[in-house]
Image (cartoon, grey):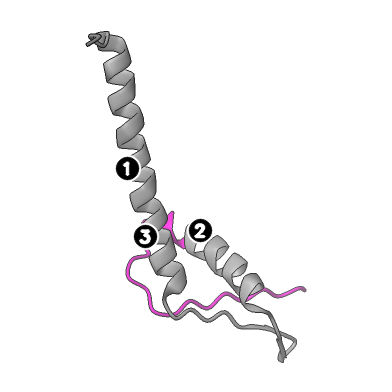
């Protein structure tokens, strides 16, 4: 049986740990995506219809932005308003 060099063993361990962490992260993302999510957009008071794919894209972008804010934690609803002058 061949003995594995220490540097290769270390790289292998790091690679496997990273794979495990990425798998865990992927599972968390899938769980969050499977939760009941709702995205509504109104333009000048008119509701804009969106399919599930578009809603997921907008959801993931906004959740990513919110997660990076230190003051935001365990939110239930978010309101974002854009106005042109």
Question: Based on the displayed image, in which of its 4 quarters is residue 35 positioned?
Answer: bottom left
Which residue in the protein does label 3 denote? Answer: 28
Residue closer to the observer: 23 or 85: 23
Of 26 and 60, nearer the camera is 26
Question: Looking at the magenta stretch, what is its main secondary structure?
Answer: loop
Residue 69 at least partly seen:
no
| Quadrant that contains the C terminus | bottom right
What is the crowding at mark 1: few (fewer than 14 residues within 10 Å), some, or many (at least 20)? Answer: few
Dot 3 lies on which element? helix
Q: Which mark is residue 65?
A: 2
32 shown above or below 77: above
Whether the magenta-drawn stretch holds residue 71 is answered as: yes
Where is mark 1, residue-wise? 20
Residue that lies at the very extreme toward the right in this rendered image: 85
| Segment colored magenta | 66-85
Which residue of the protein is positioned furthest toward the front in this rendering? 1
Q: Is residue 77 left or right of residue 57?
A: left
State the SS at label 2: helix
In this rendering, is residue 42 above or below 29? below
Comparing labels 1 and 2, the label whose residue is closer to the camera:
1
Distance in Å between CA atoms under marks 3 and 2: 17 Å
Mark whose residue sits in front, 3 or 2: 3
Percent coordinates x, y for residue 18 in the rendering: 35, 36
Residue at 52% from the left image edge and 81% from the top image edge: 38
- Of the pair 11 and 81, the residue shown nearer to us: 11
Q: Nearer the viewer, residue 64 or 11?
A: 11
Picture quadrant where residue 31 is located: bottom left
Marks 1 and 3, how far apart in space?
12 Å
């Amino acid at each position: 049986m061949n003995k594995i060099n220490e540097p290769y063993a270390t790289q292998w361990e790091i690679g496997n740990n990273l794979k495990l962490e990425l798998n865990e992260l992927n599972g968390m993302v899938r769980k969050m995506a499977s939760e009941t999510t709702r995205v509504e957009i109104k333009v000048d008071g008119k509701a804009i219809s969106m399919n599930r794919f578009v809603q997921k894209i907008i959801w993931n972008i906004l959740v990513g932005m919110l997660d990076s804010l230190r003051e935001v934690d365990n939110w239930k609803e978010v309101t974002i308003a854009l106005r042109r002058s």
